[in-house]
Each structure stands twice: as structure tokens, then as C-alpha cells.
């Protein structure tokens, strides 16, 4: 169930109802009330909320939208329980509800964190890192990443204390087009990719014992989680088409379990 879509539809319904009441009051009923008479209940609690609902709807549809991180696929960058803000206009202005792009502003770039509708389940939103853009040849072999034949700059850092697993995971710093971030690997997981789905442009990918090599088709993006061995991403369900993009994640505004994460830019 896509709660973001349900909330958007609910907000749109409230906007329409309160807007109709606001127009009716301004055009007809306000003129009929005696000077100084109190507003009726339907005006106070109906049309009175129209400006507020309108502002919230516009901000959420075209400027920023909040999301909660539900899983550990982006550890150590994003943690379960992080509430993030997503810039809705970085990659273009889209119509609410139907997500139809009407104005193109910019394209996703490698290294950015993006929220999008899940190609394998359109009722959900995923958050992953942009690894490949249209035309890129992505190779993830033996748990090392290269793009267009060039290995992504990677260096080993201190092991990560994965408290939920009560283990230390190997941690690496990757530098992708000037964006540096940390990734995790699980030594208990093999390099080869299991349970691959039959996705569009599946023929663009070659799977082997070392991992996968894919060429990103036009209008699509290759996404991966930073927690490499605990992330359902493009390696398993394929490419993300442009029309599924929600926006660019850029800010952690709340985490009830760790207040130090609040206000962090990503």
C-alpha cells in the first residue's frame, strides 16, 4: 500500500472540498450574512482551512516531501527511523498524483540519493543511490564497482559496528564523481546475484559468478543501496525509468532514536 499516494489523494480531496466551500462563501453566503455576524461552523471548519491545505498541497507536491527510511539498505548513510526531506523539483516539475513531468529542470547524477517508485512494486517508494545514468556500463564484480571500464575510487576504512547484527562489517569509502560515501559488505554473502527478476531490458545485463554487468538504457537509471549485501536494488529488479522518480533526498529532519542525526545533510 502506497501511503504517500493515499495521503496525496486525501489531501487533494480536502483541498477540493474546502476550496468549493471557500468559493461558495466568498461568492454567495458572505454577502448574505449580517455585518458582524459570526461565521457559521461550515465556514470556520470548512472553507477556513482552504488556504492552509492549499499551501501544504503545493509545498508537498512541488517543493519538498517527507519520507521515513523503513529498512537498512542504505546503512551507514541512512538509518532505519530517519525521516528525510526530498526535493521534488531538482529533477523537474511533475503533476501531483499522476507524476507526469511537465517541466524538465535537471537529471539525476551519479552519487546522488534518490527516492523513486519501486519498479517491482509500484505501491512502494524506494530510496537508493544513483550509480549509473543512461548509457553507462555498470560492472559490480567481486563486490567492486566500476563504471564504463573505470574502477570507482574505493578505500578500506574502519569496520562498521552493525549493532543490530552484533557484528563488525567491512566498510569502504567510495568516491563517485566527487561524491564520497560509505558502503558495507557482508563477508558471509557470495558475490553472485541471486533471485534476479525478469525486468524490462533484462537483456542489457550479464550475470556471472562474480556479480553483474549492465548497460543502462536511455531514460533509465541504475540504483544501488550503500549496504551492498542487504539491499534490493537494480541488481535484482532492474532499471528505474525516469517517470518513476520522486525526487532527490537531501536532509534528515528527524530521528526519534538518535537526535544527533537531525539536521544532517546527505
Image: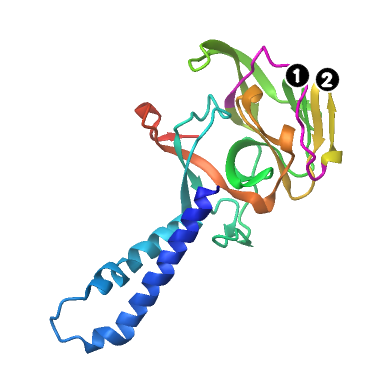
Q: Is residue 28 visible?
A: yes
Residue 197 location, x and y as percent? 77, 36
Above or below, comparing residue 92 to residue 194 in the picture: below
> Are the residues at dot 2 and dot 1 in contact (C-beta closer than 8 Å)?
yes
Q: Residue furthest left?
A: 36
At horizontal 13% and vertical 81% (from top left) the residue drawn is: 36
Above or below, comparing residue 223 to residue 42 in the picture: above
Disc 2 target residue: 209
Residue 100 location, x and y as percent? 63, 61
Q: Secondary structure at mark 2?
A: loop
Q: Residue furthest bottom?
A: 32
Q: Residues within 10 Å of mark 2 (few under 14, many from 20)?
A: few
Of residues 152 and 226, the one nearer the viewer is: 226
Name which quarter of the figure residue 199 lies in: top right
Name which quarter of the figure residue 16 lies in: bottom left
Disc 1 target residue: 191
Give the residues drawn in magenta, as a range.
Answer: 181-201
Q: Is residue 112 visible?
A: no
Q: Is 185 covered by the magenta stretch?
A: yes
* 137 displayed left or right of 100: right
Of residues 117 and 146, the one nearer the viewer is: 117
Residue 62 location, x and y as percent? 50, 58
At horizontal 86% and vertical 40% (from top left) the residue drawn is: 203
At horizontal 68% and vertical 45% (from top left) the residue drawn is: 119
Amino acid at each position: 500500500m502506497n501511503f504517500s499516494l493515499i495521503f496525496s489523494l486525501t489531501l487533494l480531496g480536502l483541498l477540493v472540498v474546502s476550496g468549493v466551500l471557500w468559493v461558495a462563501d466568498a461568492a454567495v453566503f458572505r454577502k448574505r450574512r449580517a455585518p458582524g455576524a459570526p461565521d457559521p461552523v461550515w465556514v470556520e471548519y470548512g472553507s477556513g482551512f482552504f488556504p492552509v491545505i492549499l499551501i501544504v498541497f503545493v509545498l508537498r507536491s512541488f517543493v519538498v516531501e517527507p519520507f521515513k527510511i523503513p529498512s537498512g539498505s542504505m546503512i551507514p548513510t541512512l538509518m532505519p527511523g530517519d525521516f528525510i526531506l526530498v526535493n521534488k523539483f531538482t529533477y523537474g516539475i511533475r503533476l501531483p498524483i499522476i507524476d507526469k513531468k511537465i517541466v524538465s529542470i535537471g537529471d539525476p547524477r551519479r552519487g546522488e540519493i534518490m527516492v523513486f517508485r519501486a519498479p517491482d512494486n509500484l505501491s512502494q517508494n524506494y530510496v537508493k543511490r544513483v550509480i549509473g545514468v543512461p548509457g553507462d556500463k555498470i560492472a559490480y564484480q567481486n563486490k567492486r564497482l566500476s563504471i564504463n571500464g573505470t574502477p570507482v575510487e574505493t578505500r578500506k576504512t574502519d569496520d562498521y559496528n552493525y549493532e543490530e547484527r552484533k557484528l563488525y562489517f567491512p566498510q569502504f569509502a567510495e568516491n563517485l564523481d566527487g561524491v564520497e560515501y560509505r558502503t558495507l559488505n557482508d563477508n558471509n554473502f557470495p558475490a553472485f546475484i541471486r533471485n534476479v527478476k525478469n525486468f524490462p531490458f533484462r537483456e542489457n545485463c550479464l550475470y556471472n559468478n562474480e556479480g553483474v554487468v549492465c548497460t543502462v538504457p536511455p531514460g533509465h537509471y541504475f540504483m544501488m543501496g550503500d549496504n551492498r549485501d542487504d539491499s534490493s536494488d537494480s541488481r535484482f529488479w532492474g532499471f528505474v525509468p525516469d517517470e518513476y522518480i520522486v525526487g532527490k533526498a537531501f536532509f534528515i529532519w528527524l530521528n526519534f532514536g538518535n537526535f544527533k542525526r537531525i539536521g544532517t545533510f546527505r
